Amino acid sequence: MFESYFITPESWQTLGLKEFKERFKQVLKTHSPSLACLRQVGDRSFSPEVYAAFVCLCKDFKVGAYVNLKNPKDCLDCALRHGFQGVHLKSKALDFAPQIPTHLQSFYSAHSTKQVQKALDLGVDFCTLSPLFATPNKPPPLGLDYFNALSPTLKAHIFALGGIISSNEVELVKNLHIKGFASIRYFLNP
């Protein structure tokens, strides 16, 4: 089954609880992602109420809830404390992967097939691999040919990320026969 993975934008870190819930509920109703990730950028953190609301809304909409915090230990503690389905490790936190309990699922932010393979070897369940398409303030895109050349084994664990902003890109990603796609901007479009 082709899955979709919503990653919260940096701007949501400054929202109050009510506005956060309204915006997240709108994404869930409009796009029905399979999975969602509450992502921390920089040092600003979310309140316990936001963590709880995120998990609650994910459960209400039958969406897998993941958390991605700056510090992997804090990420794990938050997932366990608030009932997230899993954690999403940032690209510099791969060495933490073996410490994630097997009852939690794990994602890793990869930027090459070598990183994907290492993550899988360390027990990570899924990887975002990016950027697929051109994305502001990111390295040059890997491109469709890069993803097409992946082995079926790797494809089963990969969510393409980067520059997926409309149904046009989603259709191209479906033809790659990978696990799914992840995006921020796609899910923010009405």
Image: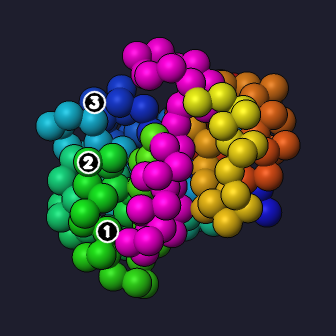
Say which residue label 1 marks. Answer: 97
Q: Determine the secondary structure under disc 2.
A: helix
The spot of residue 138 in percent (x, y) is 43, 22
- The one nearer the camera, 87 or 62, is 87
**Dot placed on the residue nearer the N-terminal end, 1 or 2:** 2
The answer to the question of whether label 3 and label 1 lie on touching residues, with beta carbons closer than 8 A, is: no
The three-letter code of the residue at mark 3 reads Thr
Q: Is residue 96 visible?
A: yes
Res 49 → quadrant: bottom left
Say which residue label 2 marks. Answer: 92
- The one nearer the camera, 68 or 83, is 68
Separation (CA) of disc 3 from disc 2: 25 Å
**Dot placed on the residue nearer the N-terminal end, 3 or 1:** 3
Q: Determine the secondary structure under disc 3.
A: helix
Say which residue label 3 marks. Answer: 14
Identify the magenta region: 112-141
The answer to the question of whether label 1 and label 2 lie on touching residues, with beta carbons closer than 8 A, is: no
Q: Residue at x 77, y 56 (%)?
A: 2
The three-letter code of the residue at mark 2 reads Lys
Separation (CA) of disc 3 from disc 1: 29 Å
Marks 3 and 1: which is nearer the front?
1
Q: Residues within 10 Å of mark 3 (few under 14, many from 20)?
A: few
- Extreme left residue here? 43
Q: Residue at x 40, y 84 (%)?
A: 102
